[in-house]
Amino acid sequence: MRVFLLHGLGQGPDSWIAAAENLLPKAELVCPDLAAWVREGADCYDRLYGRMEALLQREEEPAVLCGLSLGGVLALEYAARHPERAAKLVLVGTPYKVPKGALRMQNALFRLMPKSAFRGAGLGKQEMLALSRSMENLAPSQWAEQTPCPALVLCGERDKTNRSSAQMLAEKLPRARLAWVPGAGHEVNRDAPEALAKLLNEFLWEEDVG
């Protein structure tokens, strides 16, 4: 089983290391560097999705997609567009709708921040701005209704921003269950990697979610 772990904005593949160490060895893990793709020219959402889609389309068998935040949005769109290619789907801290107002406010703050403030985010200031602006009109709520594969929707119990989104996604996805990750905020893969791995192991190796 190939499991693709897709990180969030401001993270890198290393954000999955602690969780990956606790996953059962039967899974073959792939952690694409989304930030590297952006730096290489995939500086808007559509181009970033295109890179991920091309990667997944080369897989011989349907893959499991597990994404956090931005990674969850990418995973959800792929599973909706290519249902025959998605074996299972895990969405972590993933928005049900893109909050345009909050996104625009965030971008306004980004414009005021010095370039040095983005050094730890994996992306430069202009790359971060361009990618954020390109996400304003995304419709993950529509993709959820078109995704038939078994799905697990996770949200950190301290991630108040995404709690309602998690509930809505779980309701809209035809074959989904919802779970809260104890002690975690938005970055579940960093805040509670062992708890995340436990939930993933249970979901990955069961026959179905019904």
Image (cartoon, grey):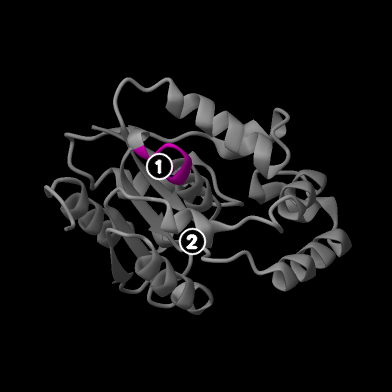
Which residue is rendered at x = 36% and y = 33% of the image?
85
Does 88 sit above or below residue 54?
A: below
**In this view, 157 is above or below 209:** below
Sequence-first disc among 2 and 1: 1
Tally of numbered discs: 2
Give percent across and percent down for residue 35.
62, 39
Task: Name the residue nearer the viewer: 157 or 79.
Answer: 79
Region in magenta = 79-83
Residue underneath mark 1: 5
Q: Is residue 99 left or right of residue 27?
A: right
Residue 15 in the image, given as x and y percentages of width and height: 46, 48
Instruction: Please state the horizontal and vertical placement of residue 47, each as a whole percent of the image.
Output: 67, 34
Identify which residue is drawn at 14% across, 46% down. Answer: 205
Examine the structure image and report whether residue 80 is included in the region drawn in magenta: yes
- Kindly identify the amino acid type of the residue bearing the numbered disc 1: Leu
Quarter of the view holding residue 193: bottom left
Q: Is residue 152 above or below residue 80?
A: below
**Residue 159 — which label?**
none
Question: According to the image, label 2 marks what residue?
Answer: 94
Mark 2 to mark 1: distance in Å? 14 Å
Camera-side mark, 2 or 1:
2
